[in-house]
Each structure stands twice: as structure tokens, then as C-alpha cells.
Image (cartoon, rainbow, N blue to C red):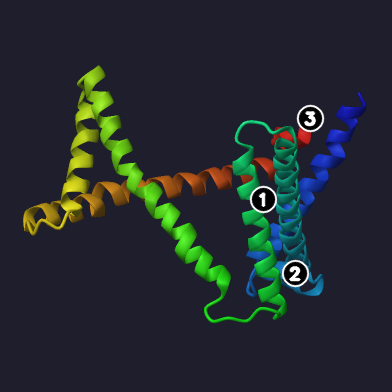
Amino acid sequence: MLGRLLRIPATAIVIGFGLFTLVGLLVGENLGFLSDFVRIGRVRESTDYLLQLVVVSIGVTVLIGIVNLFWVHLARIGRRAGGWGYSVVLILSTLAVLILTVLERTGALQQDPPITRILLEQVQVSIESALAGLLLFALVYGAFRVLRQRVTFWGLLFTISILVVLVGALPLGVTLLADLNRLWLDLPVSAGARGILLGIALATVVTGLRILLGQDRSYRE
């Protein structure tokens, strides 16, 4: 019973702050009394303050995640659990990056380019490139598994897409393959990527509307 009574003020607070922020972000200068309300009530300044609070909350959440990461891996090292050596490497790497970042931000460590940028470009980018290279083998193996189990239209389309993209990207000097690769990336691949982005945008709008209408279950339960 108490939980049900608490749903109403929680939902009202969420809807109120959501509408207040929405008004502060969307109302311009030529909307009559709405613009006057925003200007007199200093709605836009309050909206900026709320957004800053959200950013700070996200930063605190990330900090809590880092502390939890250290806690879990330190416990694994203490128990000598499987893979505890990787936990040691992770903790030392995280501490090194944090210390270097703090030293660079405070001006105690000055170097051009900064060490953190060198680590990002030489370590992180290299690892990501290696993983992207392994993606080739994963795609080829996936196409083999699909056609081995059952030959279907979608399996053939998947295999043909892989061959067109991979063979067309090779420096073979064949103009037809390069043009076909470019056409394939510009039309179906680009259309699929835009479709995914539109789906994300629509999902975001629907989620925002559900929150503004009080239909989000996380605030009603």
C-alpha cells in the first residue's frame, strides 16, 4: 500500500522535471507568452543547471563503477582466483592512466604530445585495429557455418556481402571490384546504418514520451 502511494509523487516529480526541461530546451524567442514565461521565470538557466546536475550524476556513477571495478578485482587477487594475473594488469593499467591524467591536468607533467594521447593512439587504437582484423575471420567462419547448416537466400546474401566488401577492399587494381565495393557500401550498408540510427532516435523519443506520460514502470513500481 505504501509503495502504491509513493508511486504518485515519484511519477509527478519525474513528469514535472521532464516537462520543465523540455520547455527550457525547446521554447524560443517568438512564441508569445511561452517565451515570456521562459524569460521571466529564468527557465532556460534552470534547465542548464539541471543538465549540469545530470552530468555530475553521470560522473559520480562512472566513479562508483571504477571503485566497484577495483573492489572486484582486488578480491579476485586476494583469493588467487582464476585469471587473477589479468586483474593485476587491469588495476595497474587503470591506476597508471588515472595518475597520468591527473598529473597532466594539474600541470605537473607537461609533454607534447601528452602521454595519455600516446597511450590512446599507440595502445588503444592498436588493440582495436587488431580486434577489427580478427573480425574478418569471424565473418568468414560465420558464413561457412551458415551455408554448412542450410543454404538459404539470406545466407547466400550474407556470404556475397562479405565477399564483395572484403575482395573489393583488397588492392588488386581491379576497377570493377573497387566500384562494386563502393556501390555496396554507399547503398545497402549506408541505408542499413541510417535505419539503425533512425530506430535509435525513435526509441529515444518513445522512451521520453513514456516518462512524460508516467508510463515508465521504473517510476510506477
Q: Is residue 3 left or right of residue 219?
A: right
Residue 221 shows which numbered tag? 3
Q: Is residue 189 left or right of residue 114?
A: left
Q: Quadrant of the N terminus?
A: top right
Residue 181: x and y in percent read 18, 52
Q: Amino acid at mark 1?
A: Ile
Q: Is residue 155 left or right of residue 47?
A: left
Residue 38 shows which numbered tag? 2
Q: Mark 2: few, some, or many residues within 10 Å (few <14, many ≥20)? A: many
Which residue corresponds to the image point at 65% horizontal and 61% vertical from the top-left?
Answer: 96
Residue 135: x and y in percent read 34, 43
Check disc 1 and report the residue beneath it.
Answer: 91
Which residue corresponds to the image point at 75% horizontal and 49% vertical from the top-left?
Answer: 67
Which quarter of the figure has residue 213? Answer: top right
Name the N-terminal-most of marks 3 and 1.
1
Q: Is residue 165 above or below residue 111?
A: above
Instruction: Give yes or no for contact between labels 3 and 2 (Cβ–Cβ under 8 Å).
Output: no
